[in-house]
Amino acid sequence: MLKRSAYFLGVISVALTWGGGSGLAQSDDLFLLKVAPVARKLTVWVGNSTPLEFLNLERIRLQDITPYLKPGNNTLRLNWQGLNSNGDVSLRTQSGEVLLNYVLDETRQPMNGSVRFTVFLEGKQKILAARSSETLSLGEAQLNVTLSSGILTLTLNGQYLGDYAGTSNRVLQNLKRGTNLLKVRWKKDFGVSLPLGALELKNSDNTQILMWNTDKVRSLEGEETLTFKYP
């Protein structure tokens, strides 16, 4: 078990896309930071923005952080003091897509701690909000990730898709007809527990394309390359 005074510093990247132009303000969607009441004090830094402080929250807060994000790498750093409840801090779109979901748990994280994420925004295509599978286009699939512990890093056909923690959902693009390769890397977060969870890919008719879970994972860190067919 971790000592309550320990600190943790990790780097997590999430691949996002946005529409043409020089900034995210031109996007059709907003990026929101969702903060649950988890600590006496929670401070969030987004890029070079001034710190966003959340003190003794009694209810969930939503903060628009779209103006703080830019094309390329964006740092999202969390620092908490006096962890006193279980909850999550997540980055999502206004339309409901959950791009990053970090869960804080009194039994796993230290009372005072810090974690850093790198959010990568790739500027070739428009942001894809969470949509029903019926509206997916050719070459797209719905990714659903559910983790109760650990962090996954995904790469699709050589394209980096970022890291995932907690529960996330997004639309994947650029799948090709026939054989596709999805590389799954896993690593632990706080503590020494094995990663626990699953991921699923579905196509436009809601048919399951791929299902992977951690049932056979026996190491704290590792990787597996999955081969699947896209219709």
Image (cartoon, helix red, strand yellow):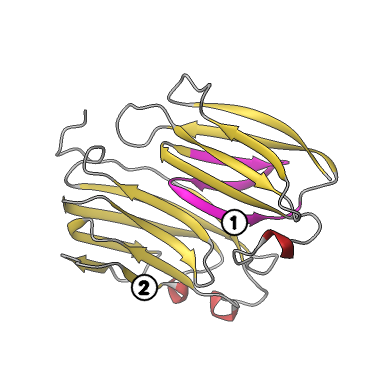
Q: Residue furthest bottom?
A: 26
* Sequence-first disc among 2 and 1: 2
Q: What's the magenta bit mostly, secondary-structure-wise?
A: strand
Residue 2 vs residue 148, the one in the foreground: 148
Tell me where residue 96 appears, x and y as whole percent: 52, 66
Residue 203 vs residue 41, the one in the foreground: 203
Amino acid type at image mark 2 = Gln
Q: Is residue 44 left or right of residue 30?
A: left
Q: Residue 166 colored magenta?
A: yes
Q: Pick the quarter of the image with the N terminus.
A: top left
Which residue sits at x=64%, y=77%? 21
Q: Which residue is mark 1?
A: 170
Which residue sits at x=68%, y=31%? 226
For the image shown, how many numbered marks are present on the structure? Answer: 2
Q: Is residue 49 above or below residue 6?
A: below
Q: Is residue 24 above or below residue 17?
A: below
Which residue sits at x=42%, y=53%? 101
Q: Is residue 215 above or below residue 177?
A: above
Residue 31 vs residue 137, the one in the foreground: 137
Label 1: state its secondary structure. Answer: strand
